[in-house]
Image: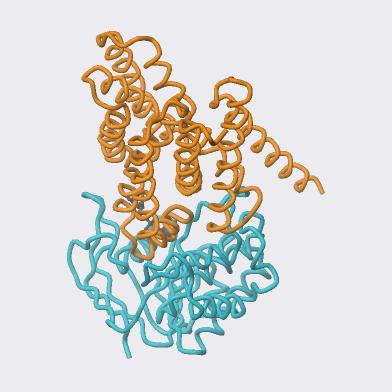
Amino acid sequence: MLALSFMRHAFIASTFIAIVSGFVGVFVVARNLSFLTHTLSEIGFAGGAFAVFIGWPVLNGMILFTMLSSILVGQMSIKESRREAVTSAVSALFIGLGILFLSLSSANASSATNILFGSVVGINLTEVWQLIYLSIIVILVIFAVYRQLKFTSFDAIGARVSGINATLYSVIFLIILALSVSVAAQIVGSLLIFILLTLPAASAKYFTHGVAKMIGLAILFSLLGTWLGLFLGYITNWPVSFFIAVIEVAIYCCALMKQKLSGAE
Amino acid sequence: MSIVTVSNLTVAYGSHRVINNLNFNINQGDFLVVIGENGVGKTTLVRSLLGFIKSQSGDITIDPQTKIGYVPQFRNIDQEYPLSIRDFIALNVRHSYLPWLKKSERQRIDQVIDATNLQDIADRPLGLASGGEKQRAYLAQALLPAPGLLILDESTASLDNEMKYELLDLVTHFQQQGLSVMFITHDWGLAQHYGTRFLRMTEDGYLTGPINELPQPEKEVK
Ligand SMILES: Nc1ncnc2c1ncn2[C@@H]1O[C@H](COP(=O)(O)OP(=O)(O)OP(=O)(O)O)[C@@H](O)[C@H]1O
Ligand SMILES: [Mg+2]
């Protein structure tokens, strides 16, 4: 199947996306940001629709919207008690906007489904390179702030009392998250972002007790899902996103079962 | 030698004045117990020492050579907390941008784990540790950068009696090696047993001195 250039592109792109998702996902889970991630993906949908409307590449629109709003939400969410309500309001607004942009643009229904459900098999070489650059940027930024990011994510109180500027790292992380959401949306689509950005990491934390190992496992789980998903999609002609979703959910169920069993003994 | 000197300190949240003209100091090697009722401003005092809140007036002088380690009053570690005790302690390794730990850093972590008697359970998840084990892990994390002053904010509050003494015996062990301690508590017994000096905080004022001058509590303490 890798003889086909579109499959090769899909394969390379999804490999990078899976690696980024594993890295970022561990911090999403540690920081309890699954809900925000979901909202960012809806904002990404609006950004994608906006891009279609003005004739940009979808990825650019997504990055623009998610970056802007993650900084905005980051500013607002300093009051944690109100975070969920504010985030819901923001996401409702953006889904509405997305629908508006799509209906204003003369785009056909398929561009909407591509944004919502991903279109990895339709990806071209330029887009592949763009995804690779972005993935490398995300990973480099994470490495550059790794120790502080780890401390603020896994022990916010301890980090604050030892003098780390929590707000700074929270903003840096939100920007990383915005980029990753836009990148991951290219393969699983806006609707299924959390399948790559939270499920593998949420599963990984039941299997190991170190940050680096959790990142490794999360990457492994998302690679497993995307590679197998691509392969199954290729041979059955069913949507790749569907298979990725099923595989990641299955891994998560195994993780929960393992947790239950070890709790019972 | 005095490592912390506080003079005429006044701290307020908005218009709500919490600390009013406080004077005391901490000397090298002290085990200073800070004792006072709920809401009298003990945690606020610590937060001012650490520079997290600005004082309205007065001076806080901290010896520039002295690093401060702080075990805060509250921590949100639940059952599902994923990191092992060792990895939790290691979060406080800093002063480098390397994503991985250097050999010297790993050695320092092992040293602190041994010193806090956590070697047998270091690889177990912190979320499943007992209250006493958790407090020892918090202590180890605070001790990792080798501070000269350790501040414990009611670290014994959730422990049973035996565990309280076990934890503080450990702290005394570090004190004998030159660590100064500021221990916040409601427990007169612990204060008498471990303290070398005290700072009594009440709504009406403050009193400080050697531990044998600590006044008896006015009412029965539970
Ligand atoms: N962030 C804050 N904003 C406004 N008021 C505060 C804040 N933190 C504490 N206070 C108030 O300051 C007073 C002192 O609080 P503090 O936490 O210092 O007391 P404490 O002596 O540590 O009490 P406890 O023994 O219960 O821990 C209390 O009246 C409290 O309501
Ligand atoms: Mg307090």
Q: Locate residue B204 relative to residue B7 in the image: left or right.
A: right
- Depth check, front residue: A217 or A243: A243
Question: Compared to B5, does B36 lie above or below?
Answer: above
Instruction: Report which colour depicts chain B.
Output: cyan
Which residue, as the protein is rendered here, is positioned at the far front? Answer: A3
Residue A265 seen in render: yes
User: Residue shown at 39%/10% (left/top)?
Assistant: A109
Percent x, y for residue B154?
50, 64
Corner quadrant of residue B135:
bottom right
Q: Name the image quarter holding the C terminus of chain B.
A: bottom right
Question: Compared to A38, does A159 lie above or below?
Answer: below
Instruction: Count all numbered tags in the image, as a single digit.
Output: 0
Instruction: Report which colour depicts chain A.
Output: orange
Percent x, y for residue B170?
59, 79
User: Residue shown at 33%/36% (left/top)?
Assistant: A126
Where's ligand 2: which quadrant? bottom left
